[in-house]
Image (cartoon, helix red, strand yellow):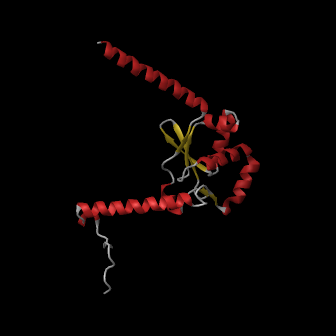
Amino acid sequence: MSPKPPNTRIPKIPNQMSFNERKADLDDQKKKEEEELERRKKSPFSDFYQVNRRHSNDMQWLLSESPKAFQILLFLLDHMDKYNAVMCSYTVFQEALGMGRTTASTAVKLLKDHGFIAILKSGTSNVYIVNNDLAWSSWGTNVQYCEFPANIIISSTEQEERTKFKKQRITTVIKKENNDNAN
């Protein structure tokens, strides 16, 4: 039996460790994950998505059948997170791609009906999931989590409404503080 190298811990089952051993184990794990994340960020391949060659004919069909649907698919590919998800409204498609609501709706339906994307609901919002057999933007180990979380894209007009709300709320808070000081 060879001697144990210095500073090497024998892995234990978490329930059989002391608190300090478990804390050290978690700290080591976190450090390794952070180092791996930094390595991936520095990679020249960190800002990519892969397209499966098996679907080249499908992509060509989509481009000839509905250029607007292809445009939306490319928009989703460009904005999806590492889990293939994007949350946005039809307003985003309209403003970013210069198309009407009916055109966007028809194009999204075509993408969904032909399996290019799936659409999940989060409250009243749509979460668009690009089929991971078609394209993928992360390391292969994340395939099992392809539906969570999502990049959320808000159009400029939607942001204006949010800004109005934020200003209104700030005004309310300031008024309350002034009333408290007056008493």
Q: Nearer the viewer, residue 149 or 120?
A: 149
Task: Tell me residue 96's x, y (percent).
Answer: 66, 38
Query: In what quadrant of the picture does the C terminus appear?
Result: top left
90 versus 6 height, above or below:
above
View extreme (top): residue: 182
Task: Tell me residue 93's x, y (percent).
Answer: 64, 38
Total tally of numbered discs in the picture: 0
Task: Tell me residue 57's x, y (percent).
Answer: 72, 58
* Residue displayed at 48% across by 58% down: 37
Q: Nearer the viewer, residue 91 or 102?
A: 91
* Quadrant assignment, res 91: top right
Query: In what quadrant of the picture does the N terminus appear?
Result: bottom left
Left or right of 96 on screen, residue 182 = left
Left or right of 59 on screen, residue 39 = left
182 versus 146 height, above or below:
above
View extreme (bottom): residue: 1
Q: Nearer the viewer, residue 53 or 6?
A: 6
Q: Nearer the viewer, residue 7 or 69?
A: 7
* Residue displayed at 67% across by 39% down: 106
* Quadrant assignment, res 13: bottom left
* Residue displayed at 28% across by 62% down: 22
Task: Tell me residue 97's x, y (percent).
Answer: 69, 39
53 versus 105 height, above or below:
below
